[in-house]
Image (tube, coloured by chain):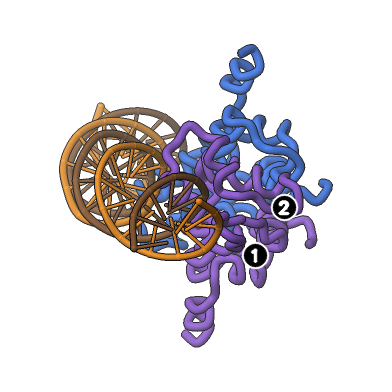
Chain colours: A blue, B purple, C orange, D brown
Amino acid sequence: MSKSRILIDLTPVQTVACSAPLTQEPLSAERAEGIAPLVKALADPVRLRLVSLVASHQDREACVCELNDAFDLSQPTISHHLKVLHDVGLLDRTKRGVWVYYSIKPEALADLAALIGGVEA
Amino acid sequence: MSKSRILIDLTPVQTVACSAPLTQEPLSAERAEGIAPLVKALADPVRLRLVSLVASHQDREACVCELNDAFDLSQPTISHHLKVLHDVGLLDRTKRGVWVYYSIKPEALADLAALIGGVEA
DNA sequence: GGCAGACATAGATGGATGTCAACATAGACG
DNA sequence: CGTCTATGTTGACATCCATCTATGTCTGCC
């Protein structure tokens, strides 16, 4: 009870960060519910490319205008995907003048990789 | 053109295995389309737990009957989720007598972790 | 102030997805 | 054979989700 209440207040990234690798012990239902949104955020080709574009960009951050240009999708659609990635804690958001820059939170990707890979972090 | 045709014939796991980490270079649209199904297969709390249950089980395999018992879901629903995981190449399937055993394909998880984590495989 | 550009939000819509009940299949065993 | 048990398949249904158009908000600038 108290354990699950604590989990409810954690972001997906935080839940991932404090979970043992999938291959080490069975994932509890509560943790699975907490982690799934993070994986789901990555489970889209457009968002995979967005993360990759940002992560591989100079200083691991990119302006929305550049990201828009990389896709044949409407600006609101890209904005929606960026919001999804930001909401789960994979991307940070900074406004500089008129432009908005999204940046990678590297530890989020690393923690998720450790959870999936399991082979010692 | 020829590159994308090759990718079309790869399974999600194979596509992941031959892709550079997300943080290293921008993911192409074709590769993103190939990888997304694998991530999507993991982007569900029930399937996360199924993978974890199988992966952390003795010999990294488990009988469907045990898996059914771990959930408050109908048997066809579990069967459906196992099929999704098997179709993308995360689980192997073996029939022994009346029972069906699903087993982890460890390299699939490792490759996915390497793609996401990026810190050298 | 007012306009223009960058980005977010709202609402609508077609398609994907998780779940179940019902049925099918396939061995084991009497 | 017939039945029981384990598992997969089908079809239906409700919900979720990716995308679009239209509109709102904020900022810089003339």
Residue drawn at (72%, 46%), measured in percent from left and top?
B57
Q: Nearer the viewer, residue B98 or D3?
A: D3
Percent position of residue B63, x then y: 61, 50
Q: Please, what secondary structure does the residue beneath circle 2 have?
A: helix
What is the crowding at mark 2: few (fewer than 14 residues within 10 Å), some, or many (at least 20)? some
Q: Looking at numbered disc 1 in the image, what kind of residue is underneath it?
A: Glu
Cβ atoms under marks 2 and 1 closer than 8 Å: no
Image quadrant where residue B112 sits: bottom right
Of the residues tagged 2 and 1, which is closer to the observer? 2
> Is residue A47 visible in the rendered structure shown here?
no
Residue placed under numbered mark 2 in the picture:
B60
Q: Position of residue B25 (x, y in %)?
A: 65, 65
Residue closest to the eye, B41 or B96: B96
- B102 vs B4, left or right, is right
Q: Give coordinates of residue D25: x percent, y percent.
A: 35, 28
> Where does the N terminus of chain A fall, quadrant-wise?
top right
- Please report the residue visible at 82 percent of the width from the left and 46 percent of the height from the top: A121
| Position of residue B96 measured from the top left corner of the image (x, y, whole percent) | 61, 61
Residue annotated with mark 1: B25
Judge if badges 2 and 1 mark residues of a common chain.
yes
